[in-house]
């Protein structure tokens, strides 16, 4: 493995523009090698990191970050499987390769619920002429779902969280996964609020929605 790639990776994680890690001490070559291996090489690992940074992902350690990248690769693999099988009709021109698949994941602007948006588009019978057009379709569903969730959190009657203006896109995506989509997430959020539940942070709230929905958490 090229040592310059390990250094470049560490430099990005330590940079002021990168907010992925709450604790930036203790970075070493072994952790960087592990991160590169799970990211499937330097170019794709860097794309993952920059995308995750844009959507507000935050991790307490490089180990957690590495798990996040493994999860992202798994989602991209599931997207590929879906688009070549059950959801083949969504896209008139097959995705040409790994780079275009990652661009679809990236440009859609979604995260853990990207596959859910794809399945929704397929269920609605939507068809797209290109991967770029499909990415725009995913992005539109994402914006609609995130707006609905934030509208609920911003309502004066919502007492679930004390602070809601720091909720990231990544956390909203995880909330959609926990609820099995926007309708399910909102249903459980309303139920928790009606029962006067309060939470210290969004992570605890996501866990509570997961519990109520009964959706299995995928262990990577």
Image (cartoon, rainbow, N blue to C red):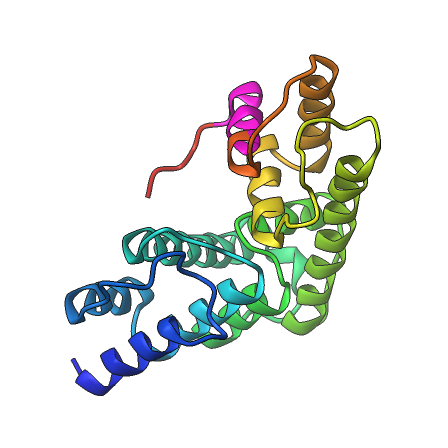
- Foreground pick, 8 / 211: 8
Residue at x 57%, y 37% (from the top left corner): 202
- The answer to which image quadrant residue 48 occupies is bottom left
Residue 60 lies, in percent from the top left, at: 36, 51
Instruction: Single out the residue that lies furthest toward the right.
Output: 156
Residue 86 lies, in percent from the top left, at: 56, 48
- Foreground pick, 172 / 166: 166
Residue 93 lies, in percent from the top left, at: 62, 71
Vertical placement of 134 versus 126: above or below? below
Residue at x 57%, y 30% (from the top left corner): 205
Looking at the rendering, the stretch of residues picked out in magenta corresponds to 205-215
- In the rendered structure, the answer to whether residue 59 lies left or right of residue 118 reads left
User: Please, what is the dominant secondary structure of the magenta stretch?
Assistant: helix
Q: Magenta includes 196?
A: no
Residue at x 20%, y 69% (from the top left corner): 33
- In the rendered structure, the answer to whether residue 111 lies left or right of residue 167 reads left
Instruction: Single out the residue that lies furthest toward the top.
Output: 195
Q: Magenta includes 208?
A: yes
Quarter of the N terminus within the rendering: bottom left
Quarter of the C terminus within the rendering: top left
- In the rendered structure, the answer to whether residue 213 lies left or right of residue 155 reads left
- In the rendered structure, the answer to whether residue 102 lies left or right of residue 7 reads right
Vertical placement of 150 versus 11: above or below? above
Vertical placement of 5 versus 22: above or below? below
- Foreground pick, 134 / 153: 153
Residue at x 57%, y 19% (from the top left corner): 212
Vertical placement of 71 versus 163: above or below? below
What number of labels is visible? 0
């Amino acid at each position: 493995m090229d040592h310059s790639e390990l250094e470049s990776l560490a430099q990005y994680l330590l940079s002021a523009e990168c907010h992925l890690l709450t604790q930036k001490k203790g970075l070493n070559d072994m952790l960087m090698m592990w991160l590169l291996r799970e990211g499937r090489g330097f170019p794709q690992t860097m794309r993952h990191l920059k995308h995750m940074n844009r959507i507000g992902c935050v991790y307490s350690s490089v180990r957690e970050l590495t798990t996040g990248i493994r999860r992202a690769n798994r989602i991209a693999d599931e997207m590929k499987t879906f688009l070549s099988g059950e959801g083949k009709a969504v896209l008139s021109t097959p995705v040409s390769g790994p780079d275009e698949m990652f661009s679809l994941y990236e440009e859609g602007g979604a995260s853990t619920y990207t596959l859910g948006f794809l399945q929704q588009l397929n269920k609605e019978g939507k068809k797209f002429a290109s991967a770029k057009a499909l990415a725009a379709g995913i992005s539109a569903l994402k914006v609609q779902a995130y707006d609905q969730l934030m509208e609920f959190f911003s309502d004066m009657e919502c007492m679930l969280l004390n602070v809601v203006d720091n909720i990231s896109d990544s956390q909203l995506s995880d909330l959609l996964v926990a609820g099995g989509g926007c309708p399910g997430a909102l249903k459980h959020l309303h139920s928790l609020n009606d029962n006067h539940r309060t939470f210290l942070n969004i992570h605890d709230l996501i866990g509570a929605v997961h519990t109520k929905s009964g959706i299995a958490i995928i262990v990577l």
